[in-house]
Image (cartoon, rainbow, N blue to C red):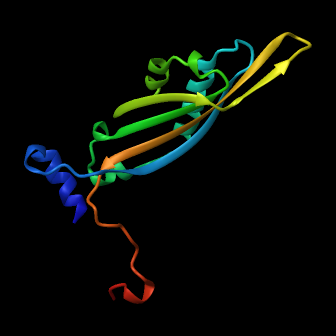
Amino acid sequence: MWQQWFIWKLIQPEMLPEMPQKRIILELGTGNDLYGEDYTKAASRAVQDALHHSSLILFRSLGIDKEGMRIQVTIGVQQPEQVERAAVAAEIPFGSVEVSAEVGGLNVIDADNGTTFVVATAAIAVFLDLPDERFTLPHPDQTPA
């Protein structure tokens, strides 16, 4: 049973072979900065939005250490070079966090007031070591009585 594997790995990780990491969560969010044209602030708000969409009890229920997660954050903004990746990574409270930024999001130009509203998107993917077996639900005719 894979839950037993997780418990065993937490107790004696050096005795188990490494398992391939699989993406188990993908959450999306949007954020903005309306007056400061701050790409990092918009990106951080997008990450917070994505985090607030999730209520995952999986880790606590199965006794999985959240620090073992690898978290990949992808930010989309019009000027990705202006995103401070370390500040965005600090928004994630656990795991090993990687942040990348690429062209995406949206800039809304307010010519009348000479400002740009920055809209960022965030995709947060969470990876865990999982056995190669696929997890499937049994067919209704095959459920035990």
Residue 86: x %, y % from top left: 44, 19
Q: Would you say 31 lies left or right of 57 here?
A: right
In the displayed structure, 14 sits above or below 91; it is below
Residue 33: x %, y % from top left: 69, 20
At horizontal 13% and vertical 45% (from top left) the residue drawn is 13
Q: Give the camera-side residue of 133 and 4.
A: 133
> In which quadrant will I find the N terminus?
bottom left
In the displayed structure, 11 sits above or below 46; it is below
Q: Would you say 36 lies left or right of 20 here?
A: right
Q: Is residue 8 visible?
A: yes
At horizontal 56% and vertical 25% (from top left) the residue drawn is 44
At horizontal 49% and vertical 29% (from top left) the residue drawn is 100
**Quadrant hosting residue 52:** top right
**Quadrant hosting residue 43:** top right
Q: Give the camera-side residue of 90 and 99.
A: 99
* In the image, farthest residue toward the right: 112
At horizontal 59% and vertical 22% (from top left) the residue drawn is 80
> In which quadrant will I find the C terminus?
bottom left
Residue 111: x %, y % from top left: 89, 15
Q: Give the camera-side residue of 11 and 55.
A: 11
Q: Is residue 92 visible?
A: no
